[in-house]
Image (cartoon, helix red, strand yellow):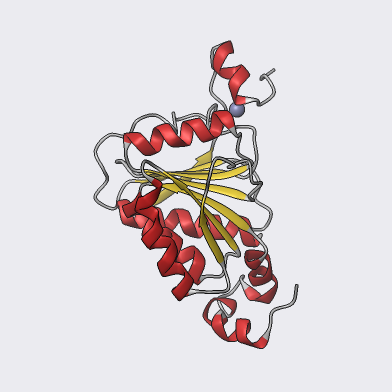
Amino acid sequence: MALTDNQIERYSRQIIVPGVGGRAQERLFASCVTVLAEPADAASVIAYLAGAGVGRIIVHPVGDPALYSAIVERMRDLNPEVSVRIAGDEISDRCDLVLALIGDALAAQAAASVAREHRTGAAVIARLDAPGRIALLPSPPPCPLCAEGDLLGPPAARAANAGAIAMAAVAEAFKLLAGFAGQQLDAELIEFDGYVSRPRALGRRRLNSAVQARCGCAAPA
Ligand SMILES: [Zn+2]
């Protein structure tokens, strides 16, 4: 799908960013992201995704879905070209990526249940407690359930730079969706200590067989 003149105008600021370009913008536009986050965290992330022209954004509510209606409404004004809606019972909607922000225990629970019941393909999981961590899971294994680091456990106190971690997670999601990360397809964990971010390879942890069966990744050798 080629970009129209209007779309080139609308997205020109990021198309001229080195490494983005029209091809990547087309891929963003054709892509679908499921966002899982509590309303306060979801609002800014969804605005960023919609403003950048991610074609379909499905909001997986944490708690009361009604709390997300205003966010979805605002996105219709921000960028009428993209579709933003609240997920119903049918999360099985095949999206390209799940972007989960784990800011509180409820979000952690919701992310764990999505991982168990629907199994995610690619996922970016941001832990908003300190120290901030972003897990990049281009495709399983490891899935969010069996990745090292207990990604879906209940979070501790919120990090002072939680907003910055959330935005960094969105940037990583863009890279995966637009495919301009140079085909870096290994699972990675990026840790923030407030000054620098350190990426490292992310492997699978040893699990008891009950969890292993639920996670759906092939049993490790
Ligand atoms: Zn797994």
* Residue at far top of view: 209
Q: Would residue 44 be seen by someone viewing this image from the given angle?
A: no
Q: Viewer-proximal residue, 105 or 139?
A: 105
Q: In which quarter of the image is the C terminus?
A: top right
Q: In this view, does 43 lie above or below 162?
A: below
Q: Viewer-proximal residue, 37 or 202?
A: 37
Q: In this view, does 89 lie above or below 28?
A: above
Quarter-of-image position of residue 154: top left
All told, the count of numbered labels is 0
**Picture coordinates of residue 179 (x, y %)?**
66, 59
Residue in the image at 43% along x and 32% along y: 152
Q: Quadrant of ligand 1?
A: top right
Residue in the image at 40% along x and 47% along y: 65
Residue in the image at 57% along x and 68% along y: 82
Residue in the image at 58% along x and 42% along y: 91
Quarter-of-image position of residue 81: bottom right
Q: Quadrant of the N terminus?
A: bottom right
**Side (left or right) of 119 relative to 63:** right
Q: Viewer-proximal residue, 170 or 59?
A: 59
**Picture coordinates of residue 188 (x, y %)?**
54, 42
Q: Is residue 147 above or below residue 2?
A: above
Q: Viewer-proximal residue, 161 or 69?
A: 69
**Picture coordinates of residue 112 (x, y %)?**
48, 31
**Side (left or right) of 21 relative to 71:** right
**Picture coordinates of residue 9 (x, y %)?**
58, 86
Q: Would residue 129 be seen by someone viewing this image from the given angle?
A: yes
**Side (left or right) of 182 relative to 77:** right
